[in-house]
Amino acid sequence: MNFQIYLKRRGKWRTFLRQVEQWGLPYVLEIGEVDTSRSPITTAVELGAAPEALVIPPAGEMYWYITLADALGVKRLVAPPPPTLAELESVYRIAVEHGVEVNWLYGSPPLARVIDVETVATVVKPTAARLVYDPARARGMREIYTTLVALSGYLREIYLSNRLGPRGPRLPPFHPSGVINYVEIMQALYLTQWGGRITIRQSPEYFPELELQLQIAREVMETVKAAGPSRKVQKRLAAIYNDLSI
């Protein structure tokens, strides 16, 4: 599993970017709303950044964003899925023609459920169902476990951020007040032998804690490699596998 950082193009993002680059960490950049009537080449020059991936708004000017990605040397776009399967397939085909990988944010139609993902993989192609998963949007730990197991082969990236409840700022993943137990989640990812990208995504006010969060995440992984997952995690995963096989 590879760690990377989530940045939004607003506020002090360039200050954060310089720090992340100084640490030598890969990052993804949420581009936000941009003027797509301008040349994507001009926008690329103004950005002056080379993220691992671009997070873009709902696909309306997909070719424009693909051109922007090409100008930046970025080979992966992260986007909310378009509302229909036909539109998703069309966007996927365009991206493939230009050598760009599209990863869809899981949780909205036509990729709102496990069965939806399987439908896209069958009707279009398995590579058209590559996903980014945000556990902070889940309704509880059981839903998170089920998603990690059922969609393991489709998940390319997982966000790590916590919350106090259904709303509020994105807390650091290992924040003591957070409702999501990421120590358990990382043990589960290790047990399922998942090998994708882990992206730490937290509100800008918590940026000073970033190094600490990375340290905790790495220590958790080292511990689970040395001692193995806890019995609790093993039992929860076994129950999920059993339910999915029924």
Image (cartoon, rainbow, N blue to C red):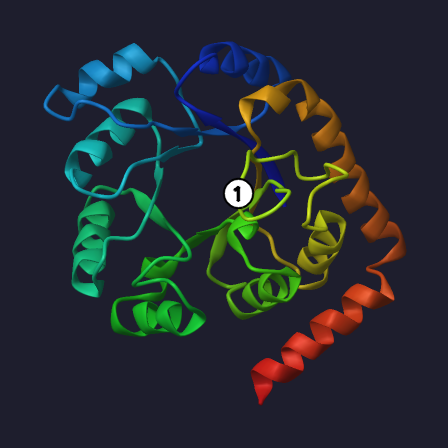
In this view, the residue farthest toward the bottom is 246
Residue at 20% across, 51% down: 91
Q: Quadrant of the C terminus?
A: bottom right
The kind of residue on which mark 1 rests is Arg
Question: Which quadrant of the figure has residue 200?
Answer: top right
Measuring from the top left, give residue 26's x and y in whole percent.
53, 28
Relative image position of residue 207 (x, y in whole percent) = 61, 21
Most foreground residue, 49 or 133 = 133
The residue drawn where x is 56% and y is 60% is: 139
Describe the element under mark 1 as helix, strand or loop.
loop
- Residue placed under numbered mark 1 in the picture: 167
Left of 207 or right of it: where is 91?
A: left
Whether residue 103 sits left or right of residue 45 in the image: it is: right
**Residue appearing at x 19%, y 18% in the figure:** 41
Q: Position of residue 98 (x, y in %)?
A: 21, 41
Residue 206: image x %, image y %? 63, 23
